[in-house]
Image (spheres, rainbow, N blue to C red):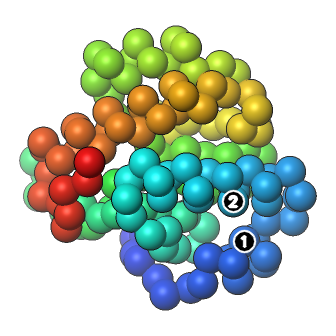
Amino acid sequence: MTKTDLTDQKIDDFINTFVDDEQKKADTYRLIELLKKWSGAEPKIWGKSIIGFGIYHYKYSSGHEGDAPILAFSPRKTALTLYVYSNTEKSKTFLTQLGNFKMGKACIYVKKLSDINIDILKEICLETINYISENHVCACKLK
């Protein structure tokens, strides 16, 4: 398993070297603005390609543990990969209203932000913040 650690890379440097599509750049800056507002946390680069907000500590029953961002996304070439989903009944209901996306195991893949309902994305993010706050040790309790 690849470790995804917090780095000190600057957000603009990352975006200017990693994102070469203008629409994806605009969507990336918009997502940063939204996730920062919803989480109350500053964006940080995790690993080579993830923009994360906040931090929490997880520990699995297997004994594996580590730190991860509370909300995050990656502006990959094929799609915006959103790490904002928790597998709750509320989140499952919100997914039915999100719009045009593909779902991975825990990731939401979106071609462009205009394909989804931003108000529903906000609800999914807030549900995830609540879920993580209730089930994990957070560096900060976000609203």
Vertical position of residue 94 compared to residue 65: above or below? above
Amino acid type assigned to the residue bearing label 1 in the image: Ile
Residue in view at x 13 percent, y 43 percent: 135
Residue 18 left/right relative to 118: right
Q: Residue 28 placed where, x, y %?
A: 69, 56
Q: Which label belongs to residue 131?
A: none
Q: Residue 122 placed where, x, y %?
A: 47, 35
Residue 7 left/right relative to 137: right
Q: Quadrant of the N terminus?
A: bottom left
- Crowding near pointer 2: few (<14 within 10 Å), some, many (20+)? few
Residue in view at x 19 percent, y 56 percent: 141
Tell me the quarter of the picture where residue 119 sits.
Answer: top right
Q: Residue 105 placed where, x, y %?
A: 45, 34
Vertical position of residue 79 compared to residue 75: above or below? above
Residue 129 left/right relative to 36: left
Name the residue carrying label 1: 15
Upstream in sequence: badge 2 or badge 1: 1
Vertical position of residue 124 compared to residue 94: above or below? below
Amino acid type assigned to the residue bearing label 2 in the image: Tyr
Q: Nearer the viewer, mark 2 or mark 1?
A: 2
Residue in view at x 61 percent, y 51 percent: 31
Name the residue carrying label 2: 29
Between the residue at mark 2 and the residue at mark 1, the CA separation in whole angstroms equals 9 Å
Secondary structure of the residue carrying tag 2 is helix
- Is residue 2 at least partly visible in the picture? no
Residue in view at x 35 percent, y 38 percent: 126
Q: Are marks 2 and 1 in contact (CB under 8 Å)?
A: yes
Secondary structure of the residue carrying tag 1 is helix
